Structure formats: C-alpha cells, structure tokens
Amino acid sequence: MLTSTALVLLMTVPGLALFYGGMVRKKNVLATLMQSFAICCLVTITWTVLGYSLAFGTGNGYIGDLSRFLLKGIGANISKGADVGFTLGLGSSNATVMTIPESVYMTFQMTFAIITPALIAGAFAERMKFSAMCIFMVLWSLLVYSPIAHWVWSPLGWVAGFGAIDFAGGTVVHINAGIAGLVCALVLGKRRGLGHDDMSPYNLTYAVIGASLLWVGWFGFNAGSAVGSNGRAGMAMAVTQIATAAAALGWMVAEWVLKGKPTVLGIISGAVAGLVAITPAAGFVLPGPSIVIGVAAGVGCYFAATSLKHLLGYDDSLDAFGVHGVGGIIGALLTGVFAFGPLSATDANPAGVVGSFAQFVIQIKAVLVTVIWSGVISFVLLKLIDWTIGLRVTHENEVEGLDMTLHGERIG
C-alpha cells in the first residue's frame, strides 16, 4: 500500500503535469505544470483538514462527519511491533475492517483526491486565472469530490447501498472530473484564436513521458485499490495492462483508418482512455472482457475527442471530458455487464457481484447521480467565482501567454 500510494502520487506529479504540459502551446507550458503542482499542494492540506473526514468519517449515507477533522485520532491504533488497522464506517452494519494503518489508507485516498481535480485542468487549459483555479479546486474537492467518494466508497454511502460498484474511481474520479471539466469549458468559453491560430502541442515528447508515467502509476491506482497483496490485486494489475494496450491500439487504428496516419498524440490518448475505462472494472473483470472494455474506450473516446467535440462546439482543450468523462462512463457501464462474481465475493455476499442487466441498470443510476451532482455544483461554484474575482484571464494575458502574465517566467 505504501508503494501504491507513491505510484498514484507519481500520476499527478510529474505524470499528469508533463502529459498536459506537453500538449499546450509554449507560452503556457509552465502555467500548466504549475496547475498540477499547486493542486497537489492545495488538496493535500484540504484533505488533511476536512476532506478525508467528509469522505470517510462515519456520518450518514450522504456525507461523513467531523470525527477525523485535522486527522484527529488517526494514530490511535498504532503500537510498535503489532499489526494495526481500523474500522471504516464504525457503527454501521456495513462496517469494513481495514488491516492497514489508517494513516496509510488516508494517504492512499489523498492521492486520489489530488489527481481528480488536477484532471479537470485539462478542459480549461490556457485561459483560467490562477487565483480562480485555486479557489475552485479547494471548494470543488470539499463539495463535489468528498461527498461522491463517501456515497460510493464508504460502507454507509447511499450509492454503494443501492448496489453500484466502482473498484478504483470510474464515477468518483473520472466521470466526476470529466463532467466538471465539460462545465468549465462551457462556462469559460473557447480559447481565443481557436480555429485560426496554431494550437499545436509545444512538446509531444513531454506528453509521451507524462502518459508513460500515468500508465506505470496506474498500477498503484487500480491494484492498490484491493488494499492488500492478493489475487484480486494481481488481476486488477493484469487487466489494467491489457485494457490499456487494447485501447491504445483501438484509438490508433480508428485514427489510421479515418485520418490516414496513426499519431503519437492519438496512441497515448488511447492508452489513457483505456486506463480510465478499466479503473471501475479492474477488481471485477477477467482478462477477456478487459480487451472489450479497452477497445470500446479507445474507439469511443476517439470519437468523443474529435467528432463529438467539433459537432457540439465546446473547447475541451486537452480532452478532459472526451477521455475521462466518456471513458469513465464506458468503463462504469461495462463493469455492470462483465463483473465476475468470484473476484468480488465476500463472506457477506459469497456469490459476489455478477454482470447482469440488473447490475447494468444500477451502474446507469450511479453514472447519472455523479453527472448531476458534479455538473450542478461545478456550475454553481464557477459562477460564484466569476461574479466575485472573475474566472478568465484578460484578452491581452491570453495572447501573451500565462507563463509570463501569471507567473513571470518563460521557457528558454
């Protein structure tokens, strides 16, 4: 779990930072890197003070309590030389006993809370004020991320209560971030010059390195969500690798057939789409279905990031919605189709969760809940910030670039 935690943090810094930084224009590279790094710092403190308690405190079906405010009591079970653990959802008939120190579980979940808002930044790249971004991310992590994490992953959560399954973050992380990103893109409007200025990525080498770090880090994301070294973790690792490769090839082939050339940006985007789609399914599906999930994500996200975006006319700069929103939805729904019971069997449910039409319908409900909450609260937060300090940089700042105008620095 310590290793998995480090791997998930690697996904944001430097993974996502380089992935996004390589895809923007030269004048905005440092500002984009700064966003990921600053979000890592902001959410770490937010999670420590209140976020973890709201997400995993006992509370009720809708929100945790303040029992872990400032991580109060988190070291209560530590004793030298002894195995330690804690009970998640204490006082609930659905309480889950963790056999790792709560400090480890808290930090593991912190890395998820860090990368989720960082993903959103891809949708508004090159045009949001840094001050507005900082305020939005803190509020969003408390009012959107923590409640949804509680609904889905707490033993008390009402979404978990109606039977929805999400192994490592299809709803909590990817659909959540993707929908928020789409709302950001719509509220902020298009980048100036889109359609006639050159919007080519500054350095695809950075993006490839970033995507590669995301791929490696994702093993901590998915296998680590088994919260132990066991067969379920091993299968989660295996299907993560398989689905990612299938999705990368799916995007590559679709692009090759329709555009005439397979691009580097295409194959790495397809790989990320596969990582996204297998995330909710990783602890529930076998290798064969993981190929189906991967291909569906690669091809589906390709069309979302190209045809759908142009058809509807929104400017999702780095395809946060096209890859994470759409990929998360594909993965969450197909989890309900392909779930293999023995992988999720417990003493309480010896048959485990089995793919069926009924489970597919339950997954649809979980997706809709996430879409509505994330979309509505994100919109309200953005409007409140816009009415107070403003969301978007000035025309002059955008033309000159955010590196110099917001941070007083430039590359080379």
Image: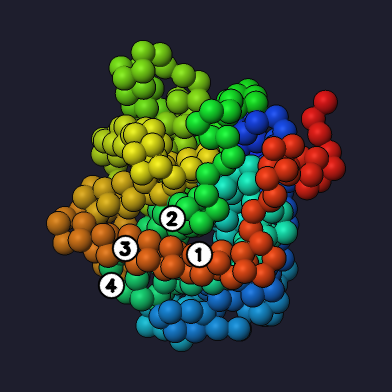
On residue 162, which mark appears? 4
**Mark 2 vs 4, N-terminal side:** 4
User: N-terminal of the two: label 3 or label 2?
Assistant: 2
Q: According to the image, label 3 marks what residue?
A: 368
Q: Nearer the observer, disc 1 or disc 3?
A: 1
Q: Amino acid at mark 1?
A: Ser
Q: Secondary structure at mark 3?
A: helix
Q: Secondary structure at mark 1?
A: helix
The quarter of the picture where the C terminus appears is top right
Q: Nearer the viewer, residue 242 or 351?
A: 242
- The residue sitting at 36% across, 76% down in the picture is 158
Q: Which residue is mark 1?
A: 378
Taking the spot 47% from the left edge, 32% from the top edge, the residue there is 269
Q: Amino acid at mark 3?
A: Leu
Identify the mark nearer the N-term, 1 or 4.
4
Q: Is residue 211 left or right of residue 226?
A: right
Q: Residues within 10 Å of mark 1 (few under 14, many from 20)?
A: many
The three-letter amino acid code for the residue at tag 4 is Phe
Q: Which mark is residue 179?
A: 2
Q: Marks 2 and 1: CB-CB under 8 Å?
A: yes
- Residue 354: name its quadrant: bottom left
How far separated are the C-alphas under marks 1 and 4? 25 Å
Looking at the rendered structure, the secondary structure element under dot 4 is loop
